[in-house]
Image (cartoon, rainbow, N blue to C red):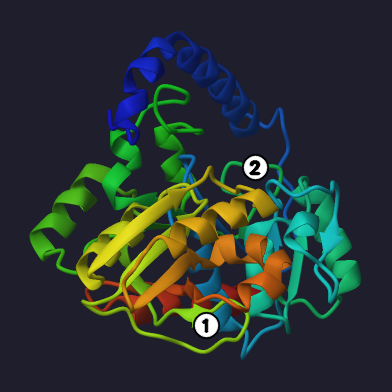
Amino acid sequence: MNFNFPLLRPIRILLFPLSLLYALIVWLRNWCYDKGVFGSTGFNLPIICVGNLAVGGTGKSPMVEFLVRKLKSDHQVAILSRGYKRKTRGYAMAGEPTTALDIGDEPMEFHRKFPDIAVAVGEERIVAIPQLLHDRPGTEVIVLDDAFQHRAVKAGLNILLSDYSNLFTRDWWLPTGDLRDARKSYRRADLIVVTKCEETMNVAEKEAIIREIDPLGHQQVFFSSIRYGNPYHITKGDTCRITGDSEVLLVTGIANPGPLKRWLNDQAGAFFELSYNDHHIFTIDDLKTILRRFSAITAGNRIILTTEKDAVRLLKFDKELAEWPFYVIPIESGFLFDEERRFTEIISKFITGFKE
């Protein structure tokens, strides 16, 4: 068992009976799908599902963005998300006046990065997909964001992500652990990606993890890392570099800021942190706290840094932010062991084979 929150460990262990009840409910649900009691609906176009077995950040957004970048030049791609923590309900398509409150921070991030593709949200994917196709009838491929456990829709290709620091094989059920689905549900995946690996991972460690996962004959396992680009200003877009004399105030409201903090520890002279809950909705009081904390930093080379997910929830303060060195750190998924080409070939073959 691997607990990501040491300070909460005693509380989470006390909740062990609830984790058994949760496991029973999920087991029963999966049994109903496996036996055909609950039906799964397929659609007449390629659907790629990106998801995980655990709660928290496993790098789903960078993987969705990676797929879109690879596919959008050759196919009409659409992204369908749940729209977690939005203030609306039901189906919605991102448009010009859309905000993170309307569709959620992750879909809003996708919409800002890829304004030329369809980005939609809907709690019930089986209902949202026909609506999306009605709104964008030219859609050729749909990428389902965070939908591995939503079995009402039968995706043609399932990509399962697992964080290197908290592999599903070592985890336990919520609320004692982080699993929201059974470990053996990994068998439904076609591709398994171990995310957030160190760039220095060696072949021996790779092979050991593959043995631990024990993939089925049809499954392939890949390894990826998070790669950070040069920060860009949240409103103006100009970029900067973080160097050994930089002092950074890191502002995050994400599930797992650990990899970014480790990166900053290597890159910056010093960094300070203001951490909020995952998907936190920033208020004007939060902004005042951020600016007051930043003003206390006396170094000449200083910036405020946040993530792309957090940036879409901070943009409502664009006028205030324009006056400050408030930067956003871009991230991408990078495949290890020179396996990006093999991964993309599998995706392309799936789409081509579906059309044939």
Query: What residue did someone put label 2 on?
Result: 151
Instruction: From the viewer's side, name the closer residue of 239 and 150.
Output: 239
Callout 1 secondary element: helix
Q: Is residue 197 visible?
A: yes
Query: What residue did someone put label 1 on?
Result: 70
How far apart are labels 1 and 2 at the CA level?
Answer: 26 Å
Instruction: From the viewer's side, name the closer residue of 86 and 252.
Output: 252
Quarter the N terminus occupies? top left
- Indicate whether 82 appears above or below 319: above
| Identity of the residue drawn at 31% across and 66% down | 225
| Residue type, numbered disc 2 | Arg
Q: Nearer the viewer, mark 1 or mark 2?
A: 1
| Identity of the residue drawn at 37% across and 74% down | 302
| Identity of the residue drawn at 31% across and 42% down | 166
| Residue type, numbered disc 1 | Lys
Q: Is residue 346 left or right of residue 6?
A: right
